[in-house]
Image (cartoon, rainbow, N blue to C red):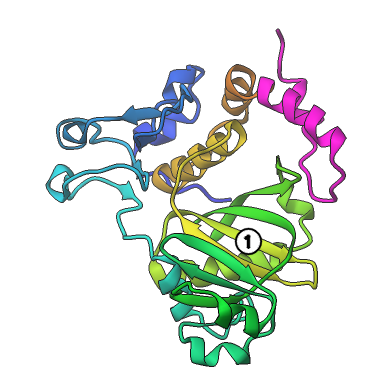
Amino acid sequence: MLVKFKNFNQYSDQYSSDVNTFINKVGIATNEDIDFPYFNYIKNQYDLKETYDNFPIIIADDYMYESSSLNESKFTYNLNKTPSFDKVLEDFNGSKFIPSYTNDIKNVKKLKFPITAINDEGEISYSTVGKLRASEGIYERFTEKIVPKTKFTILSFKGKPISAIETINRFPLDVDLSRFEFIKEVKDISKQLHDKYNLDFYNVELIESVKGGLYINNVNRKLNLNPHQAITVYEAAYGDYYSARVPKWVKEQMINESVSKYYKQKHFDSMLIKSNHTLNYKKYINYDKN
């Protein structure tokens, strides 16, 4: 990869042996109580205006701020509004990754039962039209029920998947994207969402049906990152803003200090669950020198 440096200082920094040259160069504005020491955390909206002018900032969905808090010169991710799931359904209605649905109970016979009926109070499943009509509920949407084989949460950056979590029997396990059997479909879904809504960092919750196929279940920008994802996000923002990679020796130090314990625990979890996609946690454990 040909690196395009913005100035000589960026060029010289890549040869620095001081780890502080490369950490705390990306900010996250969030109300979540997360702690990854190589990020700069922004809790107060006034800090957006008064400081943090010289590095990129990622805005989490939970962070409340006034537009006047942001300097126009800032390089800020996630300023665009996240679409509601109803909006995603409407915009991509008919796509193979959107389950068939209707907002009108008069058209519910066109759906394959069982279906899920949804309103503000939650959702409930019905196995037949008769049981639906016999209910007293008032619903806003009726969707063909997708029986999940497994669930994935795809973390993407500007249309490119950078992390995936597979949830099996309530065990969340990181996916090795290099051997992910659904990588082609996931890339396509992530790109279409980015092209439509101009999203930066965003999660796409997907359900793999027992009958085959992947279906979108939600889209959000929650930054409830696990330690492995946090490093991935840091690298993505760092590389995009500085047009340079975090050096390998710096990443190894970050893993040793902040992620090794996580890898050890998830290695044991992965031994309980059989999956063809799971990250080989064991190869990272050797970074822990303690």
Tell me which segment is drawn in magenta: 261-290
Question: Percent position (x, y) of residue 270?
Answer: 81, 36
Extreme residue toward the left, this view: 68
Residue 144 in magenta stretch: no
Mark 1 secondary-structure assignment: strand
Q: Residues within 10 Å of mark 1 (few under 14, many from 20)?
A: many
Q: Amino acid at mark 1?
A: Leu
Q: Quadrant of residue 8?
A: top left
What residue do we see at 57% from left, 79% from top? 134
- Residue 178 visible in the shown view: yes
Question: Percent position (x, y) of residue 97?
Answer: 62, 74
Q: In which quadrant will I find the C terminus?
A: top right
What residue do we see at 72% from left, 20% from top? 287
Of 285 and 153, the residue lying toward us: 153
Of 223 and 8, the residue lying toward us: 223
What residue do we see at 16% from left, 37% from top? 49
